[in-house]
Amino acid sequence: MTGLPPIPGALRTAVARDGETVVYVARERLLEAMRWLKDTPGQQFNYLVDVTAVEYRDRERPLEVVYFLRSLERRADIRIKVELNPAEELVVDSVYSLWRGADWLEREVFDMFGITFRGHPDLRRILMWETYAEGYPLRKSFPLRGRFSRAEQVRQALNANPEAHYSMEELSIAEAGGDLPDDMRDRLRRGERGVIPEPPNP
Amino acid sequence: MSKRTLELELATPGLDAEGRPARVPLTAAGEPDLGEEHMLVNMGPQHPATHGVLRLVVELDGETVVRCIPHLGYLHSGFEKLGEYRHYNQIIPLTDRTDYLSPMSNNVGFALAAEKLMGIESTPRCTVLRVIACEMSRIISHMVWLGTTSIDLGAFTPFLWAFQEREKIYDLQEMWTGARLTTSLTRVGGLLADIPDGFVEKLRDFTRTFPKTLGEIDRVLTRNAVWAGRTQGVGVLTAEQAINQSLSGPMLRASGVAYDLRKDKPYLGYETYDFDVIVGEHGDVFDRYLVRLEECHQSNHILKQALDRLPDGPINVDDPRVILPSKTRAMTDMEAMIFHFKQVMEGVKAPVGEAYVGIENPKGELGTYLVSDGTAKPVRWRIRPPSFINLSALPKMAEGHLLSDLIAINASVDIVMGEVDR
């Protein structure tokens, strides 16, 4: 057993099958750990390769949010993981303040797993549409063909209002109030965004 | 009433308080006073210059882009979810369909990750053939990029030349795999098939004639005043910004960061090939063009070296756990039949663990992250999509440029929506 690396909040380390070091970090201290890895001389992990999440088939195991970091100067990689208990609220701090590249990556994890990134400036669905109501596709509790029946999916697609494909923010830029149909104006006034349901309890 | 106000009436519907058509007031000079009013323009998802079903909502002040909001997901097919229900070899056809402009390279990326997970080392011949596949993919992907970008900016001729060269590689792909686009070239531990007779000669011919076309494209575009005017100083990203945005591939290198996975995290024995990492200086659209053009020369150079050193030998590893026995052996040899049965019925099992392999795809770093729980199907198959991440820098690059420059900037990212949306 080697000692823990001097990363703030490090819980334990492991070696992946590709030889990379995996460091598990306490959820509360993630941002601190990332800032330390990015700014400390001798670490300089200045490049965020990827952010993703893993849910295991074993429902007892925690969800993992995985960060792939790289130091372009030192040509070194490290993998940071944060474990989230699926029975609790899935929240983790956003690393957007350190890397702009985290913007869409975190949005995708939110979209696919329903993990909320605290401090992300614009956490919306990215691949699915804003009003998508079937849940989070990459969760193991999500069936391969979706939660709704094919008939219901078709019905929703046919009834979709094309205007709903503009976000409220965009419609307010246009100040198109006068030209919009009444129901759209009502939605604007309410400040409505797409309603995303809570993930069902496993 | 002047003619101008009449036109404006038509252009600005809506009624004022008295129920008359609202008009844009004219300034003293007779120009319409648009004041601080911004316009929202919707571009795509059906638009030739968005390179696929990308939709951009652009907030304009006059003709200047104030903000650009991309909308994705029109081509989302849930590949990563599908992968969780498939055996490792069954995932390979899905990788064709992500970045469909360089399918062979994607196949290689997935096979490398699966082999890393299972602790398999491919044979020398297979390794060199995979290098050939990757570099052929780089050339066709860059050719499509060059052709479509030049057509976006009004140059039609390079498009025809580039697609002619691409056609030659497609013929080679068809010779090798039987398919032009959905190649599914690799298998875990080897390849679908060895190269057919006449392939080497045909590829050699290509490597001889290809630089001539590149030279022609270079002559037509590089010192072309229109091309330079549309691309130089447009969509600039500094090295620091490019790193912070997690860009990769030509986008990163055009900003002056010399990072190429083939050199810095070598796979497939790339460290033994002689080639240069092409780096730009200004990080604008023009430098991205130069980087991609020169990368084609380097790929051509690598292809020649690979053909020279192509060793004889098997293309598949000698491991009955992952490679199907030949049909003859499966029919005559009991043990071979058992392996055949187990592989077809149960799939190739991977040990518990995880592996990430990043390869230098034409568009940037294509990462494949596989997590296994010991069964024949991965728990998680994650693609690190280079064009998705490169595209995330678009709003930043487009700010403050003209709407027409947005076309050039978007083209310079080199996106393929199959990969962005997966």
Image: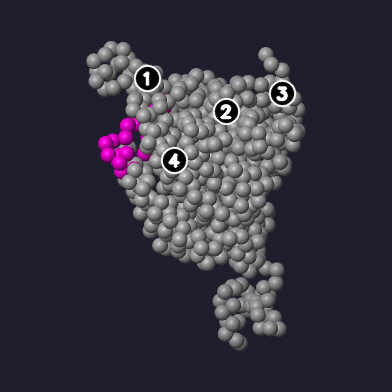
Tell me the residue that label 3 is attached to: A5
Task: Please say if B363 is above or below B155.
Answer: above
Question: As shown in the figure, which amino acid type bears the numbered disc 4?
Answer: Ile
- Identify which residue, A155 or A2, lies in the foreground: A2
Question: Helix, strand, or loop for circle 4?
Answer: helix
Q: Position of residue A60 (x, y in %)?
A: 60, 21
Question: Helix, strand, or loop for circle 2?
Answer: loop
Tell me the residue that label 2 is attached to: A55
Whole-angstrom CA distance, mark 4 to mark 3, is 40 Å
Asked if badges 4 and 3 are on one and the same chain, I answer no
Question: As shown in the figure, which amino acid type bears the numbered disc 3?
Answer: Pro
Q: Chain of mark 1?
A: B
Q: Which mark, by number, is residue B318? A: 1
Q: Quadrant of the N terminus of chain A?
A: top right
Whole-angstrom CA distance, mark 4 to mark 1, is 28 Å
Question: Helix, strand, or loop for circle 3?
Answer: loop
